[in-house]
């Protein structure tokens, strides 16, 4: 297939399935479900350290009608592809290689749409240690990445074919080093950037730093591929903010705090690039007294904007909240066990009908049907076996 035809096919598929974007048009699961293809590609990122049995990035096919997944196959051999993201219009998948500083990379892979197998397009240094997260802005101009080990964030420009450019040097440039510490002597002795996402049509990037107990808002210039600190928002000392999810209406945002097992709701001013605290709630029921060894991981807003989900490691569950459409505040509904262990990551499929959770230490993917009326999760089974799964990525992405 010629490149121009493949790109045209990708754009048509994305527009048809997503109704341009869940951010721009009212969402209905029924409308999107009527237009989705019979099956979708879905990739699983893994940790490939010795003893895990994982070889890199795996691919499966997902049936959006039945919710069934095919047996996973190795799509690409690479080291510690612990986080994945897709280009918004091109058949290109990006992955981190979460390694020590000299070996840490961001990789761009070309997608074989027939098989889901990946061919390396190019790679660039992450300019830090332990890249654990990456995202792509909605225009497809830049990739943003967080280096947990060295506590920095980076912005890499993209070429027209989706391949990666190196980090722009200088100030402002494509590299920002966070600095400081917080209460937890082991986990917060220095900065640990854990996520970064574009917001406000690419004008800002929101980064959670677990080590600083801060959410840092950076001014983003996608054309120049540069970042500049705009402001920092403090969370409760010792909370450890990890990931951030923006509501589809772009008026609210939600941070999951890894260390104190909470979710914090904010009002987001898209023009000013500011966050105002609304509330902080636990991710666990009050009766769970012994929380030793527990931590949170991922946070996702349902594309309809009515529900929010958060994962608990140790308790091995997904917390469920309803979202007040006017205030953005949350109401805790309860938790659902994942039938696996250590849900580091989970996703909602593009139709909004299913939730898939990755059990890192159980080597499993759990599948749940989402009750559209209540937000509740119904485990459908059976568990899919994937070695050390730590990220799930649908094609095309929501």
Image: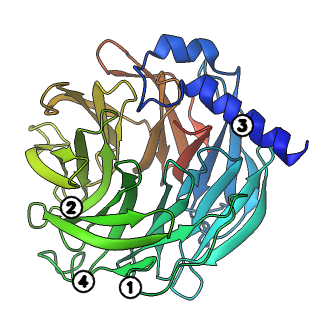
What residue is shown at x 43% (from left), y 23% (from top)?
Answer: 25
Q: Residues within 10 Å of mark 3 (few under 14, many from 20)?
A: some
> With respect to residue 157, does 27 lie above or below?
above
Q: What element carries label 1?
A: loop
Q: Is mark 2 on a helix, strand or loop?
A: loop
Q: Is mark 4 on a helix, strand or loop?
A: loop
Residue 311 visible within the image: no
Q: Name the residue under label 2.
A: 259
Q: Name the residue under label 1.
A: 171
Judged left or right of residue 218, residue 34 is right
Q: Disc 1 or 3, which lies upstream in sequence?
A: 3
From the image, state whether disc 2 or disc 4 is nearer to you: 4
Q: Disc 1 or 2, which lies upstream in sequence?
A: 1
Using the numbered discs, state the Cα–Cα distance from disc 1 to disc 3 in whole angstroms.
36 Å
Q: Residues within 10 Å of mark 4 (few under 14, many from 20)?
A: some
Q: Name the residue under label 4.
A: 179
From the image, state whether disc 1 or disc 4 is nearer to you: 1
Q: Disc 1 or 4, which lies upstream in sequence?
A: 1
Q: Name the residue under label 3.
A: 10
Q: Where is residue 339 in the image (x, y as percent from the top left)?
A: 43, 36
The answer to whether marks 1 and 4 mark residues whose Cβ atoms lie closer than 8 Å is no
């Amino acid at each position: 297939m010629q490149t121009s035809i493949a790109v045209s096919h990708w754009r048509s598929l994305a527009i048809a399935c997503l109704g341009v974007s869940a951010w721009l048009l009212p969402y209905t699961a029924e409308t999107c479900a009527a237009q989705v293809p019979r099956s979708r590609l879905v990739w699983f990122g893994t940790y490939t350290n010795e003893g895990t049995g994982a070889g890199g990035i795996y691919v499966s096919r997902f049936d959006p009608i039945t919710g069934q997944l095919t047996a996973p196959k190795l799509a690409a051999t690479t080291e510690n592809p612990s986080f994945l993201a897709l280009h918004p219009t091109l058949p290109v998948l990006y992955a981190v290689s979460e390694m020590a500083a000299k070996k840490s990379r961001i990789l761009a892979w070309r997608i074989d749409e027939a098989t889901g197998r990946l061919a390396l397009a190019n790679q660039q240094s992450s300019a830090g240690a332990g890249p654990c997260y990456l995202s792509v802005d909605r225009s497809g101009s830049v990739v943003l990445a967080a280096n947990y080990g060295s506590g920095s964030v980076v912005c890499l420009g993209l070429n027209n074919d989706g391949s990666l450019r190196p980090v722009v040097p200088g100030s402002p440039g494509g590299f920002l080093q966070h600095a400081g510490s917080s209460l937890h002597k082991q986990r917060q002795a220095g900065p640990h950037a854990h996520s970064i996402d574009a917001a406000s049509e690419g004008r800002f990037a929101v980064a959670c730093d677990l080590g600083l107990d801060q959410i840092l808002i950076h001014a983003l210039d996608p054309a120049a591929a540069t970042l500049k600190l705009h402001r920092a928002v403090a969370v409760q000392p010792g909370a450890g903010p990890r990931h951030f999810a923006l509501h589809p209406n772009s008026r609210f945002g939600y941070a999951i705090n890894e260390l104190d097992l909470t979710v914090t709701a904010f009002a987001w001013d898209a023009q000013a690039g500011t966050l105002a605290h609304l509330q902080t709630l636990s991710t666990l029921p009050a009766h769970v007294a012994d929380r030793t060894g527990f931590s949170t991981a991922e946070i996702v807003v349902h594309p309809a904007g009515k529900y929010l989900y958060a994962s608990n490691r140790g308790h091995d569950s997904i917390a469920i909240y309803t979202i007040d459409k006017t205030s953005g505040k949350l109401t805790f509904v309860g938790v659902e066990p994942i039938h696996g262990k250590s849900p580091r990551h989970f996703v909602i499929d593009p139709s909004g009908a299913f939730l898939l959770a990755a059990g890192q230490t159980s080597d499993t993917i759990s599948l749940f049907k989402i009750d559209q009326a209540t937000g509740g999760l119904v485990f459908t089974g059976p568990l899919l076996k994937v070695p050390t799964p730590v990220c799930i990525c649908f094609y095309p992405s929501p």
